[in-house]
Image: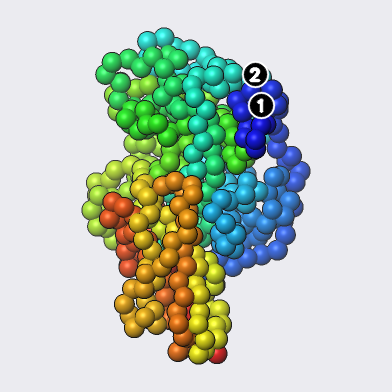
Amino acid sequence: MSGGRLSRRALIAGAGTAALAAPALAKLGGMIDLGLPGGPSLRPTTPDFPGKQGMIVQRIRPPLLEAPMAVFREGVITPNDRHFVRWNWPMPTEVKAADHRVAVGGAVKQPVSLTLDDIASAGEQVEIVAINQCAGNGRGLSEPRVTGTQWGNGAMACAKWTGVRLKDVLAKAGVAEGAKRVRLAGLDVPLTEGAPQFIKSIPLDIAMRDDVLVAWAMNDEPLPILHGFPLRIVVPGWFSTYWVKMLSTIEVLAGEDESHYVAETYRWPTVAVKPGDKDFPTVPITAMPPRSFITSHADGAVVRKGEPLTLEGIAMGGNAALAKVELVGAGSGGGEPVPCTLGPDDHGPYAFRRWSVTLPQVSGDLVEIGSKATNREGASQPDALVWNPSGYARNVIERITLRAQ
């Protein structure tokens, strides 16, 4: 490592073997209440999950770990040990970097099998700060309740990712004329015989973007095994279902992708639906919408009546840069939105940004206040939940009530 950056040569020289210490998986700590309206809300926390501290345990095997919202008070970049974890199928508990290969095939000029050294030397080393967010983040807050992991709002994180461009890795094989999509798979395997492998694909034009990476580092450290050691895909602005971990196969497709996790699931309606509706048209979940959160105060917190109040939080623009954040709701300036001050734009369009606003005087309870983010493409958070049966892409304004005393 030089100058605080993990170089490609450091990756090759020092990656070695990553292993997960399975015995630690059973050690749980206290309990936390996620405030879920539709079902059991208490979840255990763990101080001892390998490489993690104080995470909310949604499931142990395969691991589903959520970050407490308090993590997002601490800064724009989420530390690796507080970054959420999501695996669809069991992951290998040990990966030897020296033996790892990435097969590139399909609609290419010459199929290749690439070592980590081949990947690392495929092109320019690139660093991108981007939010990694589960498509189901906030699903547990849906009303009425929907099926799937009952996440609170902590299935998200922001990190600096280091790697090479996916398009430079594709160039090792040469993309054939007429190619349409790039399909990606990792080392995780289905839990039951006959179940579909977790395979995702992205359109070729997305795969060829300058900011879509095959990454080997996360916040200047080699990828932890829980986050996809030794390589993972990074698609800034898109949900993490496309950020395939433990990357082992890249397949260029000449046609559409009919695999399960593209054609049948991770899809949402193209029309308004209500509970019980069936046979509606759907499209794949892809880009993230804008979101924001008040992080300085929890719901139900007590504030001092007659005094100024400063509220702070984080926001993101989703698939475009953040343009503004406003405080909305009863008590926030007579009902009119109050412009918030955005923190420095130090990390690019796909990162969290801090925001703050000071109310000159608290005259009474602040009931159902929230923050509303708008990105530079004009997309904003809606006031009411746009319900869908999978609880995907939640970006409703998240509200809290503060009690004045």
Does dot 2 land on a helix, a strand or a loop? Answer: helix
Q: Quadrant of the C terminus?
A: bottom right
Left or right of residue 17: residue 270: left
Quarter-of-image position of residue 87: top right
Q: Residues within 10 Å of mark 1 (few under 14, many from 20)?
A: few
Q: Quadrant of the N terminus?
A: top right
Assess disc 2: are there few (<14), some (14-19) or many (≥20) residues with their C-alpha within 10 Å of its C-alpha.
Answer: few
List x then y, in percent, for residue 259: 38, 31
Query: In the image, which is nearer the foreground, mark 1 or mark 2?
Result: 1
Amino acid type, mark 2: Asp
Q: Position of residue 232 (x, y in %)?
A: 53, 33
Label 1, secondary structure: give it.
helix
Q: Relative to 122, say whether 31 is above or below.
A: below
Residue 134 lies, with reference to residue 222, above or below; the image says below
Q: Amino acid at mark 1?
A: Ala
Please tell me which residue is depicted at 41% across the width and 58% down the height of the picture: 291
Camera-side residue of 186 and 79: 79
Identify the residue at image location x=41%, y=47%: 349
Residue 329 picture location, percent across and down:
37, 76
Which residue is denoted by mark 1 in the rendering? 10
**Count of numbered badges drawn on the protein:** 2
Between discs 1 and 2, the one toward the N terminus: 1
Above or below, 111 relative to 379:
above
Q: Which mark is residue 377?
A: none
Any part of residue 68 in sight:
no
**Residue appearing at x 49%, y 24% in the figure:** 124
Q: Nearer the viewer, residue 94 or 338?
A: 338
> Separation of disc 1 and disc 2 at Cα?
17 Å
